[in-house]
Amino acid sequence: QVQLVESGGGSVQAGGSLRLSCAASGSIFRIGVMGWYRQAPGKQRELVADITSGGSTNYADSVKGRFTISRDNAKNTVYVQMNSLKPEDTAVYYCTVRVAPSTYWGQGTQVIVSS
């Protein structure tokens, strides 16, 4: 089993910044892709960004240029630095980790951006 612990959510005004962290622990041999998804009220869960073990990144168009995903393979931790936050970024953010053959999800952390 793999456990994911997220931190860093909270409330911020538009234009502000937050950094989310997600640490994986447990029966980990090799972590593949790590990423962040979000789900706003009444909407489907959507990909925010993901990053491969080699460092290749992928971003949703809505966050390009504002969010930066990174990972520390030695710590089994993935981060997302969120700058220039907008009210439409308000959502519960979930980290996800691929440890073949399974994909694991964090419990979610709330991000609220007020205008």
Image (spheres, rainbow, N blue to C red):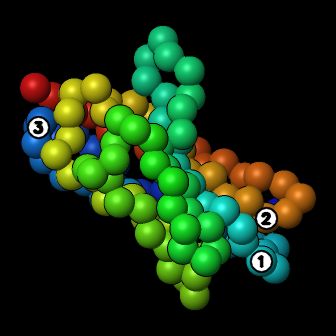
Which type of secondary structure does the marked residue at label 3 adopt?
strand
> Looking at this rendering, what residue extends furthest in the right direction?
101
What residue appears at the point 54 percent right and 39 percent down from the top-left corner?
A: 47
Q: Which mark is residue 13?
A: 3
**Marks 1 & 2, CB-CB < 8 Å contact:** yes
Q: Is 29 on the left or on the right of 21, as rendered?
A: right
Which type of secondary structure does the marked residue at label 1 adopt?
loop
Q: Position of residue 32 (x, y in %)?
A: 72, 68
Is residue 9 visible from the viewing direction of this image?
A: yes
Indicate whether 14 appears above or below 24: above
The amino acid marked with disc number 3 is: Gln
Q: Is 55 on the left or on the right of 41, as rendered?
A: right
Tell me where residue 102 sits by quadrant.
bottom right
Is residue 5 visible from the viewing direction of this image?
A: no
What residue appears at the point 56 percent right and 21 percent down from the top-left corner?
A: 44
Q: Which residue is mark 1?
A: 30
Q: Residues within 10 Å of mark 3 (few under 14, many from 20)?
A: some
Q: Position of residue 19 (x, y in %)?
A: 31, 59
Along the viewing direction, whichever of 59 and 19 lies nearer the viewer: 59
**Marks 3 & 1, CB-CB < 8 Å contact:** no
Q: Which residue is mark 2?
A: 99
Image quarter of the C terminus: top left
Q: Position of residue 92 (x, y in %)?
A: 44, 35
The amino acid marked with disc number 1 is: Arg
Along the viewing direction, whichever of 32 and 77 lies nearer the viewer: 32
What residue appears at the point 61 percent right and 61 percent down from the top-left corner?
A: 34
